[in-house]
Image (cartoon, coloured by chain):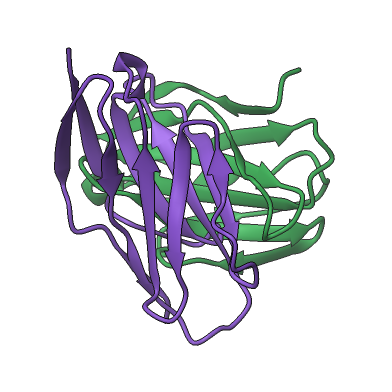
Amino acid sequence: NAGVTQTPKFRILKIGQSMTLQCTQDMNHNYMYWYRQDPGMGLKLIYYSVGAGITDKGEVPNGYNVSRSTTEDFPLRLELAAPSQTSVYFCASSYSGHTEAFFGQGTRLTVV
Amino acid sequence: AQTVTQSQPEMSVQEAETVTLSCTYDTSESDYYLFWYKQPPSRQMILVIRQEAYKQQNATENRFSVNFQKAAKSFSLKISDSQLGDAAMYFCAYKGSVWGAGTKLIIKP
C-alpha cells in the first residue's frame, strides 16, 4: 500500500524561485494537510482540505498556496521562495478530523 | 485559539523502566480528539495513541497508556517497559491542527 506519497524528498531552491510540492494519497481520505516542521519544533499547519474543491488556511499560510481538484492530490505551491521557508514539509491525510493522520515521508527544503 | 504545551524538551529513562511524558492543552471546545505521535530519526510520523475527549476511560495500546484529565486539560503519555526502539521525538497533538514542540525521549541501555 502506497499510503501518502510526497515528492520530492529533498530540494534546494534559490531565493525568489517557485516550486510545487506534490502529495497524493490512495486511501480515499477526505482530509488532507500540509505542515512544516522547523528544527527542534513540532508541526505547524499551513493549509488543509476537507474534500475536493475545499481548502482552508492553517496557522502559517503566508507564502504558500494549495489546490484540491481531486480527492487524491493536494499540491503545495511556494511562490517567491524565502530563506524563512527552509524547513521540512509533511503532507498527511485522514478519513476525518478525528481519526489517525497518515503522513508522507517529508520533503526537506532549503532556500539559499 | 487552541494551544498545546509540552514542558519537557528531553527525557531519559533506563531500558525496561517506565517514563511519563507531559502534555497540557487549552481549548474552549468540549468534544475533541488528542493524539500522541512518535517521530524516530527516520522522520516518519507514527501514531502512538488516540484519546476521545468524551470518553472518560484512558486509552491504552500495549505498553503505551495515557492519563487524560479533561478538567485539568492534561494528556500525559506513559510508556511502560521502555525499549531501545522507543527512542524518538514524541509529539502531543490537538486534533490534527495544533501540535506541541515535542519531547525527545532517550533510552539508556
User: Could you tell me if residue A19 is visible in this image?
Assistant: no
Residue projecting furthest to the bottom: B28
**Residue B79, image quadrant:** top left
- The quarter of the image holding the C terminus of chain A is top left
Q: How many marks?
A: 0
User: Could you tell me if residue A107 is visible in this image?
Assistant: yes
Q: Colour of chain A?
A: green
Image x and y of residue B37, in percent = 45, 41
**Residue B107, image quadrant:** top left
Image x and y of residue B44, in percent = 46, 27
The residue drawn where x is 73% and y is 33% is A25
Seen from the viewer's position, the closer of residues B53 and B82 is B82
Seen from the viewer's position, the closer of residues B72 and A85 is B72
> Taking A74 as reference, is B44 left or right?
left
Q: Which chain is purple?
A: B
Image x and y of residue B25, in percent = 37, 71
- The quarter of the image holding the N terminus of chain A is top right
Image x and y of residue A12, in percent = 32, 26
The residue drawn where x is 35% and y is 24% is B86
> Taking B72 as reference, is B57 left or right?
right
B103 is higher (above) or lower (below) than A51: above
The residue drawn where x is 66% and y is 44% is A93
